[in-house]
Amino acid sequence: MDNFDVLVIGGGPGGYVAAIRAAQLGFKTACVERWLDPAGKPALGGTCLNVGCIPSKALLDSSHHYEFIAKHAAAHGITASPELDVATMQARKEKIVGTLTQGIAGLFKKNKVTWVQGSAKFASPGEVVVSDAQGKETQRIKAEHVIIATGSVPAAIPPAPVDQDLIVDSTGALAFTEVPKRLGVIGGGVIGLELGSVWRRLGAEVTVLEALPDFLAAADQAVAKEAHKLLGRQGLDIRLGARVTEAKAARKQVTVSFEVDGQSETLKFDKLIVAVGRKPNTEGLALDVAGVGVDERGFISVDERCHTGVGNIWAVGDCVRGPMLAHKASEEGIAVAERIAGQKPHVDFAHIPWVIYTWPEIAWAGATEQALKAEGRKIKSGSFPFMASGRARAMGDTDGFVKVIADAESDAVLGVHVIGPNASELIAEAVLAMEFGASAEDIARTVHAHPTLSESMHEAALASDKRAIHF
Ligand code: FAD
Ligand code: NAD
């Protein structure tokens, strides 16, 4: 039996970050992780590094370059006809993943976190049994504190069972070895739009079947409307209100039947991606043995401090309530390690940034206009289009805008919504502003370098007071 102060189950962005922070705080810390890479080698990093954030961004960047060369370079006076080598693109992606996951193993060594390879299961609230891939028990660990960070897995729908050949989930869609001629995507959410964009840029005809009648219902509706228009113009065929009734895989193609407004339709695809959300990953953990409860959707029940209500057991990241985002998981992991050390950290759930890495990118933080109006809040807002930005013009990336929403009386910034080039980077300023309780006037009075895309944030803040200079 091995004894630790802190045992973390799961080595994704929630778990590995919690383990490093706990070790920094002086705790004898172990992290159990069972992930095996495609070559069967144990790997840290969880969904995010292995089959999520990082590989998807690698392919998004590669495919963005391809599309730039194919469609936009000529406008810069550069003529080239790109040749696509999917194998090299995929090998580049794998190399990035490998470098980063090994980097975490290095960080564990540096911080003296013990990586226990295998699958963990509760034997009692403070004791865990670890098994290898064959299910054979390899180790028993006792710990003063346990942090569960077991993440999430793709959700399934009965009409479209995933076979990872013709019908794939996000993991399969990151590993295509050639560009499918016709690609179907069930789910017009973050994964559907990002991975749909990757393969469209590389030449696939992409149809997205989204069940809801509204596009990107969680986003500010002005941004969602613009995104729908721009992504449609790029060639994503987005069908809203589509109820998939059957997906039949034959030898080389998938036939998908769906209904829109009561009308049945059938489409044939070479590949079909199912991207209808993710569900908490708690199978095989024996939570009942530890006495840890789950809510009606299977998420581990925790309070605002990520405490399960059972002894010294905590849970963070995708396996608990809240957005399924890597940075949310990591901040919760850090906060729990600090709570164990008796500190009083705080995670501001109201200002967690969201980013969708299409091009233009979509990013927001804080409240949407529709949510604030539904609450009856008196608001004002200002928007600034990238069309009017000198830097965006120089880049040749003029689609989209920045929208700043502020309280009508106090001028406090309540939400910032961006669709445009590098929105993923621009949103950080808005998050910081809201974190510090800034007013739109504070952003308007802050000097922004010229010529930068960030001037559009400045101008949108000015616009909320009807005094934008360049629009
Ligand atoms: P995970 O990363 O899922 O890690 C959990 C780990 O626990 C896994 O490694 C698993 O093997 C391990 N584990 C589970 N059970 C056990 C057990 N019993 N014993 C031992 N180990 C166990 N988020 C963003 O913020 N930005 C993005 O750009 C982004 N892109 C994404 C793209 C895709 C295609 C996908 C699928 C997701 C993306 N996400 C993104 C979401 C992000 O990956 C997750 O929010 C994040 O990984 C959650 O971190 P986590 O630590 O909670 O869980
Ligand atoms: P999602 O919740 O973003 O989107 C799923 C979509 O599928 C929704 O629009 C939903 O209405 C639709 N849907 C559900 N059932 C359907 C059905 N039967 N037929 C048609 N449509 C259906 O989920 P996702 O895109 O699978 O991503 C999962 C999670 O991973 C997200 O919560 C997200 O936070 C995370 N993620 C984040 C990023 C990022 O931060 N850039 C990227 C990828 C994934």
Image: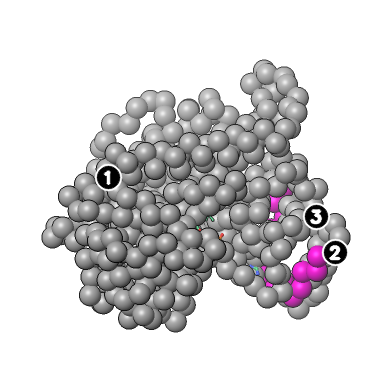
Residue drawn at 42 percent across, 29 percent down: 452
Identify the magenta region: 230-250
- Residue for badge 1: 112
**Nearest to N terminus: mark 3 or mark 2:** 2
Residue 128 visible from this viewpoint: yes
Q: What is the x, y in percent for residue 365?
A: 38, 54
Tell me if mark 3 has few (under 14), some (14-19) or many (20+) residues whose alpha carbon lies within 10 angstroms of its own: many
Is label 1's Cβ within 8 Å of ligand 1?
A: no
Q: What is the x, y in percent for residue 398?
A: 55, 36
- Residue for badge 2: 250
Q: Quadrant of the C terminus?
A: top left
Q: Amino acid at mark 2?
A: Ala
Q: Amino acid at mark 1?
A: Lys
Task: Name the quadrant containing residue 64.
Answer: top right
Residue 395 versus residue 252: which sits nearer the camera? 252
Q: Amino acid at mark 3?
A: Asp
**Label of residue 268 in the image:** none
- Between the residue at mark 3 and the residue at mark 2, the CA separation in whole angstroms equals 10 Å
Does the magenta-highlighted stretch encompass residue 227? no
Task: Name the quadrant containing residue 4.
Answer: bottom left
Q: Is residue 306 left or right of residue 365?
A: left
Q: Is residue 460 left or right of residue 135?
A: left
Residue 198 versus residue 320: which sits nearer the camera? 320
- Residue for badge 3: 270
